[in-house]
Amino acid sequence: MRLRRQFGTAAALALAAALLVASGTPARAQVLNSAASPIALRAVLSQSLTVTLSGNAVNFNLVSGSANNPGSTSITATTSWILQTPVAIVSLYAFFANAGSALTDGAGDNIPSADFQISDNGGAFTALTNTVPFGGANAGLTLGQTLILLNNRGSRTDVMKFNITLSPLPNLPAGDYTGTLTIQAQAI
Amino acid sequence: MKTGRLIRVVAVMLGMACVASMASAQALNSGAQTIALNANLTESLTVALSASAVNFTLAAGSATNAGSTNITATTTWALKASRTAVAVDAYFASAAAALTDGAGDNIPSSAFFIADNGGASTALINTVAFGAANAGLQLANVPITAANRSGTRADVMAFNINLTGGTLPQLPAATYTGTLNIQAQATP
């Protein structure tokens, strides 16, 4: 009887221990990780090349046959660039769409680009008679070129003065002549 | 020695980088910036005289009373394309009293003659664009074409007063004064 009681006690202790072990298992389990999901990051600082103008209109009071008909104001073109290539040439161009009719009265009377002149940064007045990457053939002028060498961020300014010579056009009729001069830069 | 070699190597590498960069570069263009051009060639029409006074020493009843000097009228114009003619007129404000002594004795315009550029001497008896009826003379009428929208002409005027007509042989001795006008007109 006493032996049976002692056996029962031992069995009870064994059962309690088993339950204790079983109840403690979750607290010591291994962490479960998912697979890593990579995100590719790509930051691009784009190349840029911009031209800004200090004004967008120039007026001329023409005198028949006169070589000197200056524009009412000068205009500053500021060219700014951020380039990817360490070596480049930035060129600034002025041009018309058509060499034969830079300005026109709309009635068939024209002032050609050859009689439109720009003085860049105090230089000599030069007619727009060259073919440049933009505009009409023989209707442009390269205002300036800047060599980029290991410094691919920068800017340049070009102060443009304007003149129309009517010496080659002594019979130009009186009238209002309008036109559009375009300024554009190219990096290559 | 090592430094010099290093410099040469760097220079060659830099040159190769430049060539590679230039060769592979694509042109980068800025946006086109425009400048509106407005040029006004105003119409003009002017007459300039080489002198502004002529004296006559009159002989009673004489057909030939020449002016003391010739006067050159220089007409200069810059015209719109729509103009077709430029006229130069000489005229008085009154046909009956081209010159007057202020006491009711007058020399009519019909007794006043102009020889233009060596032509025949002609009385001012026509109605022109300016002045009184029958008190003028058109010195010139220049057709305007694309070839002469800007131009000039000279009219050398020689003057004479003819005192043989009507009651003029009885013109009293006195000082007669008057104003001859020269004016140009572009039409239409």
Image: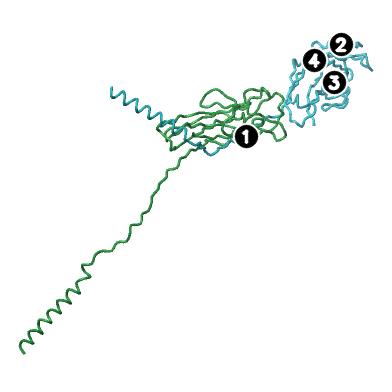
Chain colours: A green, B cyan
**Circle 4 — which element?**
strand
The amino acid sitting under disc 1 is Ala
Residue behind mark 2: B65
Q: Which mark is residue B156?
A: 4
**Circle 3 — which element?**
loop
> What's the chain of the residue with tag 2?
B
User: Within 10 angstroms of label 1, few (less than 14), some, or many (20 or more) residues?
Assistant: some
Name the side, left or right, on which B46 lies relative to B140: left
Vertically, is B171 above or below A64?
A: above
Please give the name of the residue rendered at 14% of the width and 76% of the height, measured from the top-left corner: A17
Q: Which mark is residue A97?
A: 1
Residue A71 lies, in percent from the top left, at 59, 29
Please give the name of the residue rendered at 80% of the width and 27% of the height, measured from the top-left corner: B85
- The Cα atoms of the two marked residues, 4 and 1, are separated by 48 Å
The amino acid sitting under disc 2 is Asn
The amino acid sitting under disc 4 is Val
> Which of the two residues, A66 or A21, is positioned nearer the viewer here?
A21
The verdict on a common chain for dots 3 and 2 is yes
Query: Which label lies toward us, 3 or 1?
Result: 1
User: Within 10 angstroms of label 3, few (less than 14), some, or many (20 or more) residues?
Assistant: many
